[in-house]
Image (tube, grey):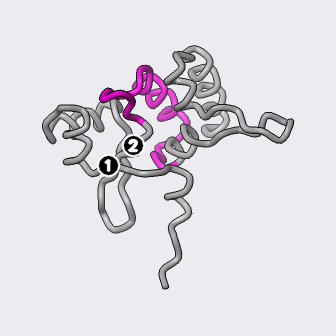
Amino acid sequence: MTDKNPWAEVIGPCYTRTSLARALGWIEPEVATAATSLTVLELLTEDDVLLYPACQVWDGHVVPGLTEVLQVLSTGTASRWTWAQWLNTRPDDGHGGDEPSAIERLREDDLDGVLLEARHDAWAWSS
């Protein structure tokens, strides 16, 4: 029996390059370019498979503001797995509940708040 990868629970479902291109109405070279420019988050697995977290797609588009947030996070660490975890983690609100994750807040148009937290955490990671 194989143990489930804990990252799957944190990051959730993922697209392949082909399926992300289809979901966004793009062609595969556009996905590759978008990953290089941090327009989309691309993750490389230990067995050299490229995955794209599904959370970054909303209503057939890349979540607004994602590029800006990824660019900020990249100043703190090069670990894209850390970025994916940061985007998806739901912080405890201190009262037994969870706050929305950063990716959920981006969907709700809270780019300024998410960027503020991204700058803070990126600074902490780089210290």
> Which amino acid is tagged 2?
Ala
Q: Is residue 84 left or right of residue 99?
A: left
Membership of 76 in magenta stretch = yes
Membership of 96 in magenta stretch = no
Name the residue rendered at 30%, 29% in the picture: 60
Q: Which residues are magenta?
A: 56-81
> Which amino acid is tagged 1?
Tyr
Q: Earlier in the sequence, mark 1 or mark 2?
A: 1
Callout 1–callout 2 Cβ contact below 8 Å: yes
Q: Nearer the viewer, residue 118 or 14?
A: 14
The quadrant of the picture occupied by the C terminus is top right
How far apart are the two marked residues, 1 and 2, measured between alpha carbons? Answer: 6 Å
Q: Nearer the viewer, residue 71 or 87?
A: 87
Q: Which residue is mark 1?
A: 15
Q: Nearer the viewer, residue 96 or 76?
A: 96
Q: Is residue 11 left or right of residue 123?
A: left
Q: Secondary structure at mark 2?
A: helix
Q: Which residue is mark 2?
A: 54
**Rendering coords of residue 83 (x, y %):** 51, 41
**Rendering coords of residue 76 (x, y %):** 55, 36
**Disc number for residue 84:** none
Image position of 69 with respect to 41: above or below: above
Name the residue rendered at 42%, 51% in the picture: 13
Determine the image quadrant of residue 105. top right
**Rendering coords of residue 6 (x, y %):** 56, 63
